Amino acid sequence: MKILILGAGAVGGYFGGRLIEKGEDVTFLVREKRQQQLREHGLNIKSPHGDFSIRPKTIVATDDDEPFDVVILATKAYHLNGGLRSIEPFVREYTMILPLLNGMEHMEELRGFFSPEQVLGGLCFVESTLDEKGTILQSSDKHDLVFGEWNGKKTERVEKLEAVFSGTKAGFRLSENIQQDMWHKYLFISTLAGITSLMRSPIGPIRDTMEGRTYIQQLFEEIRLTMEEYGAPLTDGIVEKQMEVIEGLAPTTKSSMLRDIEKQGLIESEHLHGYLLLLAERFGVETPLLRLVYQHLKVYEKNLGQ
């Protein structure tokens, strides 16, 4: 399969690099600055799972319109609108669109922009970042990518995609309940991002203070109630299971949102927490801690000049 990845950053660069390492046909659609960086220094991954370096194939949005079998969206939500326009020339009726964005709001936009049948569900768990030279630093055991048909069916095309992903030095998994998996990820990441950004701290010090676990649990519950009122397919006991995951995280674990804040960068406040607040207001769910998190993020954005 010919694979196009929108973005060669901490997520797209990592999983794309692992696919290239395996021998798959991967091209990155990037901005000119990143293209120049990759041409000069290559795509470099430093990871507990093994380092890897290569000069990958790259294109910019104005290059051409060659078709691809699958397009992986590894961009931030605030770049999605421009990203959709940039990948449109490379998409045909048979092209699968695989998004790896956090949250759920983007699925409506994707399924409206392209044919709904083209859009798969997808998510990933990877703690990675770029250093000042553009090297991808992946720092934990977790490096998983989950994908599947939106309707849960195990179709011929996703089985072919599963075969392409298999044998890669990362955890690619085909899901037959991707909507539930995505809502579970949304619950986890919005809580982790919210609490670490609010406290400006990795998870360890928050978890180990007297009231820290209480606040983590409260934010989980507020978001869970909001999602359940909306009709999200959450499993019973999901908060308890995700609290166990929180307990097992390395004390130094940071959310990607906190890392973006530390770099004085843009954040996905509206896509993650703003969307949840809209749902909470629609269904009359009281979410005081979620509101505090959101207000904190909006003040950060105001001070950043957004």
Image: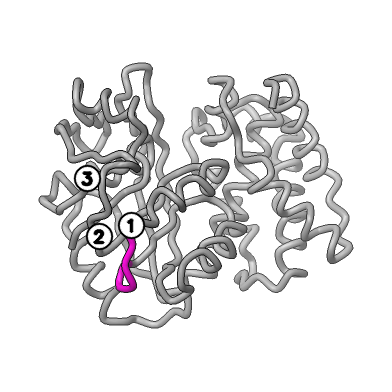
Considering the image in quadrants, where does the C terminus appear?
top right
How far from the left and from the top, in percent, is residue 242?
58, 54
Q: Residue at x 25, y 67 (%)?
A: 161
The amino acid sitting under disc 3 is: Arg
Viewer-proximal residue among 164 and 33 = 33
Q: Amino acid at mark 1?
A: Val
Query: Dominant secondary structure of the magenta stretch?
Result: loop
Callout 2 environment at 10 Å: few (<14), some (14 to 19), or many (20+)? many
| Figure check: 212 above or below 238 | above
Residue bearing the label numbered 1: 71
Residue 35, percent from left and from top = 28, 30
Q: Earlier in the sequence, mark 2 or mark 3?
A: 3
Camera-side mark, 2 or 3: 2
Which badge, 1 or 3, is on the more N-terminal residue? 3
> What residue is shown at x 42% (from left), y 38% (from top)?
127
Say which element carries label 2.
loop
What residue sits right under mark 2 in the picture? 68
**Pair 2/1: label in front:** 2
Mark drawn on residue 18: 3
Colour option used: one colour
Marks 2 & 1, CB-CB < 8 Å contact: yes
Q: Which span of residues is magenta-colored?
A: 90-95
Camera-side residue: 172 or 216? 172
- Residue at x 70%, y 52% (from the top left corner): 220
Judging from the image, what secondary structure is the residue with disc 3 in?
A: helix
User: Tag 2: residue type?
Assistant: Phe
